[in-house]
């Protein structure tokens, strides 16, 4: 049985988001085709947490850049003090979610996995909007940095 089929059964038991919507946002199938998934809700929660953890690392590097990384040091300069406040708020929310997932790793509970998935899915557009904003700042920052570098080059 596939992950999607297992999930559809669980969706009928619990009020869960549409599988295809979750897959679109959190790429559930990249591993699930390899073998049967014994605990579909746990697997989906982990995939969600993987994506959120990636965002946490990105935001952490903006707030506290690695001094050994030119990229981190440069990117941290792209953000205003107001941006940094927004990052802190989002990072705290993401860490709260990530730590809830950690608790569920230790104490598996199907009902709590359902609540976790539903909560994240209901908050996802807000999280996505914030991370998209910060991603856009990074893109614009590098665009400006590239323009500066070209102007500062000496070809003489």
Image (spheres, grey):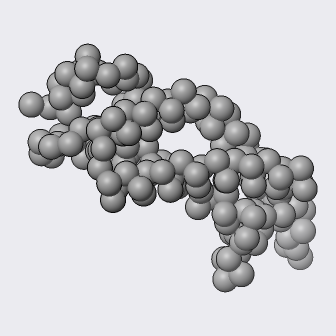
State whether residue 24 appears in this view.
no
- Kindly indicate the quadrant of the structure image that contains residue 109: top left
Would residue 27 be found to the left or right of residue 66 on screen?
left
Q: Position of residue 110 (x, y in %)?
A: 29, 38
Q: Position of residue 117 (x, y in %)?
A: 42, 34
Which residue is painted at 73% across and 70% down in the image? 64
Residues 146 and 45: in front is: 45
State whether residue 78 appears in this view.
yes
Q: Is residue 124 above or below residue 134?
A: above
Which residue is painted at 54% across and 27% down in the image? 122
Residue pushed farthest left?
1
Would residue 105 be found to the left or right of residue 99 on screen?
left
Would residue 29 be found to the left or right of residue 119 on screen?
left
* Count of all numbered marks drawn on residues in the image: 0
Would residue 137 be found to the left or right of residue 1 on screen?
right
The quadrant of the image that shows the N terminus is top left
Q: Position of residue 13 (x, y in %)?
A: 25, 20
Residue pushed farthest top?
12
Residues 9 and 67: in front is: 9
- Kindly indicate the quadrant of the structure image that contains residue 66: bottom right
Which residue is painted at 75% across and 64% down in the image? 63
Q: Is residue 101 above or below residue 115?
A: below
Q: Is residue 119 above or below residue 49?
A: above
The quadrant of the image that shows the C terminus is bottom right
């Amino acid at each position: 049985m596939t992950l999607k089929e297992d999930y559809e059964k669980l969706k009928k038991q619990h009020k869960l988001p549409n599988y295809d919507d979750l897959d679109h946002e959190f790429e559930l199938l990249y591993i699930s085709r390899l073998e049967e998934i014994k605990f579909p809700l746990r697997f989906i929660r982990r995939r969600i947490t993987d994506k959120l953890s990636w965002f946490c690392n990105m935001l952490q590097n903006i707030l506290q850049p690695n001094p050994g990384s030119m990229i981190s040091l440069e990117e941290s300069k792209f953000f205003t003090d107001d941006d940094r406040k927004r990052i802190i708020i989002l990072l705290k929310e993401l860490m709260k979610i990530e730590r809830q997932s950690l608790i569920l790793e230790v104490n598996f509970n199907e009902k709590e996995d359902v609540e976790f998935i539903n909560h994240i899915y209901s908050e996802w557009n807000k999280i996505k909007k914030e991370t998209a904003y910060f991603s856009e700042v990074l893109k614009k920052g590098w665009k400006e940095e590239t323009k500066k570098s070209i102007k500062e080059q000496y070809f003489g």
